[in-house]
Image: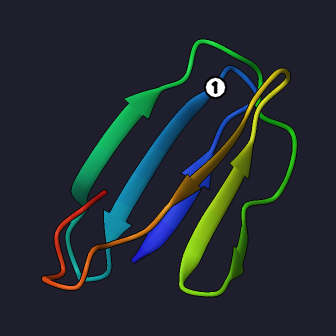
Amino acid sequence: MFLACSGEGKVTVIRPGSALDIAYQADFDEQIFATPAFAGGLMYLRTDHHLYAFGTNNQGSRK
């Protein structure tokens, strides 16, 4: 997966392949200028005013 974040607060997850395949999109309604960080099985995303942590539960679904 490839993760793209825009300064306007939009996050797009793209599956690799020969054709564009957008897996997920979200709008955080805040600017994002920090690079997402990965640690301890989580992805951390910082916006202007918040810090988010994303991961999966033991069954592999999103938290």
The percent coordinates of residue 7 (x first, y second) are 76, 29
- Near-viewer residue (49 or 13): 49
**Would residue 43 appear left or right of 59 to someone viewing this image?**
right
Q: Nearer the viewer, residue 14 or 52?
A: 52
Q: Is residue 39 left or right of residue 14?
A: right
Instruction: Residue 39: give x, y in percent of width and height.
Output: 70, 83
Q: Depth check: 6 or 61 in front?
A: 61
- Of the 4 image quadrants, the one containing the C terminus is bottom left
The quadrant the N terminus occupies is bottom left
Residue 37 rendering spot, x and y as whole percentages: 75, 70
Quarter of image, res 21: bottom left
The residue to which callout 1 is attached is 9
> Residue placed at 32% from the left, 81% from the top?
16
Q: Circle 1 sits in a helix, a strand or a loop, which is it?
A: loop
Q: Which one is nearer the viewer's eye here, 58 or 61?
A: 58
Disc 1 packing (10 Å; few <14; some 14–19; many ≥20): some
Say if 38 sits above or below 52 in the image.
below
Which residue: 68% across, 20% down? 8
The kind of residue on which mark 1 rests is: Gly
Coloration of the structure image: rainbow
Rendering coords of residue 14 (x, y %): 35, 63
